[in-house]
Amino acid sequence: MKHVDVGGAAPYRIAIGEGLLRDGAALAKHVRGRHVMIVSDAQVAPLYARDLADALQAHLPDARVIVSCIPAGEASKTLDRFAELMRELADFGATRDACIVALGGGVVGDLAGFAAACWMRGIDCVQVPTTLLAMVDSSVGGKTAVDLPQGKNLVGAFHPPRAVFADTATLRTLPDRELRAGLAEVVKYGAIRDIAFLDWLQAHADALLARDPAALVEAIARSCAHKADIVERDPRERGERALLNFGHTFAHAIETEQGYGGLNHGEAVSVGMVCAAHLSSRLGMAPESDATRLAALLTRFGLPVAIPAGLDLAALVDRMRLDKKATAGSLRFVLWRGAGKAEITPGVKDADVLAAMRPLQSAPP
């Protein structure tokens, strides 16, 4: 068991270890009222929702605990699904001291967190992430959002959770593809600010892929500590927090252009980080050898490092213009001065972005 504390105006604790979603006493401490809605999806709910609900109910005998289940996948992160949650909360009679518990991956966490941010102008949310990616990224920091056809996460709010419970036992049922996707976000923390962590990941790659409990807890705790350190200083992404988006401008463009039906988020981030590293090299900011090393580590984790075949590179650049990291009149990227030294780089020219992507595009089948 490890803990990471997130400070700032709305402090909370991240608990990391096995068996946490059955720890009703710890979970119940963060419920102030008598209405608890567990939001989960069709893949996770059958595995864990009943155990979580029973654990909460045992320690909140006067509360009503219900489960709302959404279809699994990014396609559920929409305004229509958000509206359904609003109607469910209304039918539930949820009051201002109600609590939403997000049980699932990043889609559930983003959607449930956004519902909590909006119901009666903000109610409590407890994040119980069940994917590695959600444990190290989306459950921490209070970003909540839904997608539009034009792009990812364009409608949302900052709404910090009251607590995060990362139950690593849930990773035993995580498909291999989703485990690898989470490792992409873990690698990101080393890439942006901790070259020693990259070395650690290289040395422990086999243990992480084999789901060694100690290695997973260590990787999650180190990742969360990095994110907590940044989020405390920049809770609303006015500056330094944007570094956490390394590779994400490329990734979101790829996901959107594929209609959220191709690479998953972690896979797209893997490709995006390699694109960002090569763009950094093209601009003379970093040695090409660091980009090669990053791609090799991601490949060892079974992640893609090439832009999928069939995507129009100019269309990807157009998608990037609507990215939240773009500014009026120019593209802005998180690039690096080499491994462990990321920085925000405005005013990047389209031609350089296209030139960096072109060698990384997969050949048509």
Image (cartoon, rainbow, N blue to C red):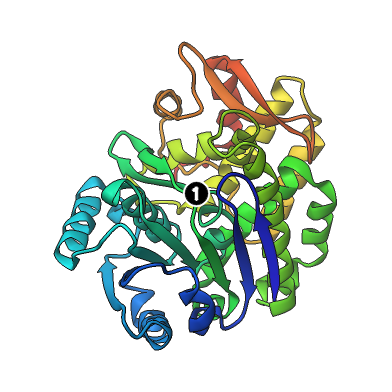
Going by the numbered disc 1, the residue's amino acid type is Gly
Across and down, in percent, residue 280 comes to: 70, 27
User: Above or below — where is 306 with respect to 267?
Assistant: above
Across and down, in percent, residue 104 comes to: 42, 67
The residue to which callout 1 is attached is 142
User: Above or below — where is 21 with respect to 318?
Assistant: below
Q: How many labels does the image show?
A: 1
- For the point 66% across and 61% down, which residue is it? 301
Q: Which of 167 and 330 is in front in this view?
A: 167
Q: Nearer the viewer, residue 109 or 213?
A: 109
Q: Which residue lies furthest to the top in this view?
A: 329
Q: How crowded is mark 1: few (under 14 residues within 10 Å), some or many (20 or more)?
A: many
Across and down, in percent, residue 101 comes to: 40, 67
User: Above or below — where is 348 with respect to 168?
Assistant: above
- For the point 70% across and 23% down, which residue is it? 282
Q: Is residue 131 visible?
A: yes
Q: Quadrant of residue 5?
A: bottom right
Q: In which quarter of the image is the N terminus?
A: bottom right
Q: Is residue 34 left or right of residue 23?
A: left
Q: Nearer the viewer, residue 5 or 75?
A: 5
Q: Can residue 299 be seen in this view?
A: no
Across and down, in percent, residue 239 comes to: 62, 28
**Mark 1 secondary-structure assignment:** loop
- For the point 55% across and 46% down, which residue is it? 269
Q: Nearer the viewer, residue 175 or 43?
A: 43
